[in-house]
Amino acid sequence: MKKLIGRILVGVVILASSACTKTDNYDGPNASLQGNIISSEGGNLPTSGNSTQIRLQQIGWTAPQTIPSKFDGTFEDTKLFKGGYKVVPTGGAFWPVTDTVVVNIDQDSKHDFTVTPYIVIKNFTSSLTGTTLTLKFDITAPVAAGLPTIKDVQPYVNTTKLVGTGASIRDFSDLNLIAINKQFTDMTAAEKTITLTIPNLIPGRTFFVRAGVRLSDSFNSSNFSEIIQVDIPK
């Protein structure tokens, strides 16, 4: 009996070892998806770090994944598995997209999304006097009815082209925030023309600057201007 039990145990060990060394025949993540998040008002939607994302749900799998948008409104992920995905843009300062699309992702797949921004920054200009930078712009709303409350506006200043929420110099950015806390429809025409002043920039330095309008949606998201380069004379 002991010999029989011993032979059975040896057989179990051999089978287990065989299972552990089984070759993985699944292909690696060699597919990709890239594209643009396009504003309904024209051009790509300017975004920022940790804001707009593309959410993907592979059909037949439960765990979703995301692709972060780049600052210029483009996105790309080169390490995806081939297959069909339900895809939707989320997290940005635009009217929620409720309809997902199905994209069959393979090598070099491309897909663009068009969204309607909450706020559009227009007529964006800058002027420099000594070490004080002044930004001026107008804000408009493609859809005013039901728009989330406008919380504040502020400049974003950094020493690299990666400039926006979570990527700015506090003394030049957060300290120059202007609180609004109004519905867009309650703002006067004069209040929709914004002036931001950034004093005491460092002589001889180069800064990258943009403006942002933050709204009280579930993401506390912001609409952004273009990014400009500002060279401060010595």
Image (spheres, rainbow, N blue to C red):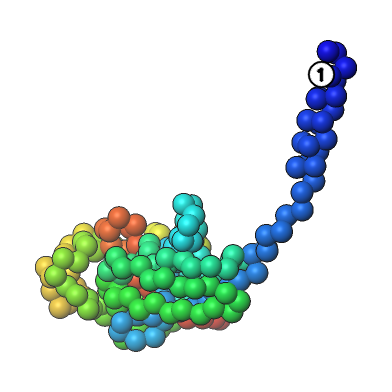
Residue for point 76% across, 42% down: 20
| Quadrant into which the C terminus falls | bottom right
| Quadrant into which the N terminus falls | top right
Q: Residue furthest top?
A: 1
Say whether residue 212 is left or right of residue 85. Answer: left
Residue 13 position, x and y percent, is: 81, 31
Q: Residues within 10 Å of mark 1 (few under 14, many from 20)?
A: few
Give, as a three-letter code, the residue at label 1. Ile
Q: Nearer the viewer, residue 97 or 183?
A: 97
Residue for point 26% across, 58% down: 216
Residue 130 appears in the rendering = no
Residue for point 35% across, 67% down: 100
Q: Nearer the viewer, residue 77 or 8?
A: 8
Say whether residue 10 is left or right of residue 145. Answer: right
**Residue 127's image quarter?**
bottom left
Residue 226 position, x and y percent, is: 42, 80
Q: Secondary structure at mark 1?
A: helix
Task: Identify residue for label 1.
Answer: 5
Residue 3 appears in the rendering = yes
| In this view, 92 is above or below 10 | below
**Residue 102's image quarter?**
bottom left
Residue for point 11% across, 68% down: 186
